Amino acid sequence: MPTIETFRRIVDPADCDMLGHMNISRYFACVSDAGLGLMTAFGLGQDQISGGRRQAFAVVHFDTTFHKEVLPGDWIYIRSGLTEIGNRSCTIRHVMHRATDDVLLFEATAKAVLMDLDTRRATIVDEGLRAAMGPFIIDA
């Protein structure tokens, strides 16, 4: 399956730092929201996080590459997918583009563990969840 769009917005001047481009903290806020979008797509939405399964993926490692500056007024979007599903973790790939010309802006690969929100410990990706995640596997 190809990646799916998990995030889209216009960059506000308040997202930018004194250098005039989007602050690094905002990139991570964007990919955090994109991660929630991807989790929702495979069945771990707010209903399952706050009730239901009481599980969510929590990022434990990020690798990022900044390709171009993101400026106030840029319309950006992120497409996401999974490159790997492990026993207790998954690897998520996020790619940010500028919507007006599809220029590559930013890439992030995140290793995330499935966390039991009651015990605050990593837990097993059961067969039902693995099956729901399967269609979101992409080529890295």
Image (cartoon, rainbow, N blue to C red):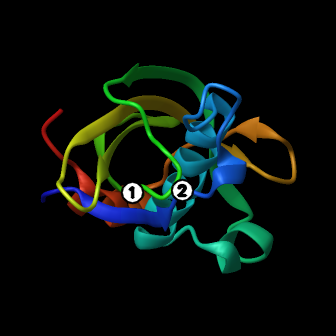
Name the residue: 41% across, 68% down. 42
Name the residue: 22% across, 49% down. 137
In the rendered view, does 125 fall on the left or right side of 2? Answer: right
Using the numbered discs, state the Cα–Cα distance from disc 2 to disc 1 in whole angstroms: 7 Å
Label 2 belongs to which residue?
11
5, 10: nearer the viewer: 10
Q: In this picture, is 68 found above or below 78? A: above
In the rendered view, does 48 fall on the left or right side of 98? Answer: right
Give percent across and percent down for residue 83.
26, 37
Task: Check residue 76 in the rendering and tell me which mark sits there, or answer none.
Answer: 1
In the rendered view, does 87 fall on the left or right side of 68? Answer: right
Which residue type does callout 1 highlight?
Ile
Name the residue: 22% across, 62% down. 135
62, 49: nearer the viewer: 62
The quarter of the picture where residue 120 lies is top right
Q: Quadrant of the N terminus?
A: bottom left
Give percent across and percent down for residue 13.
65, 52
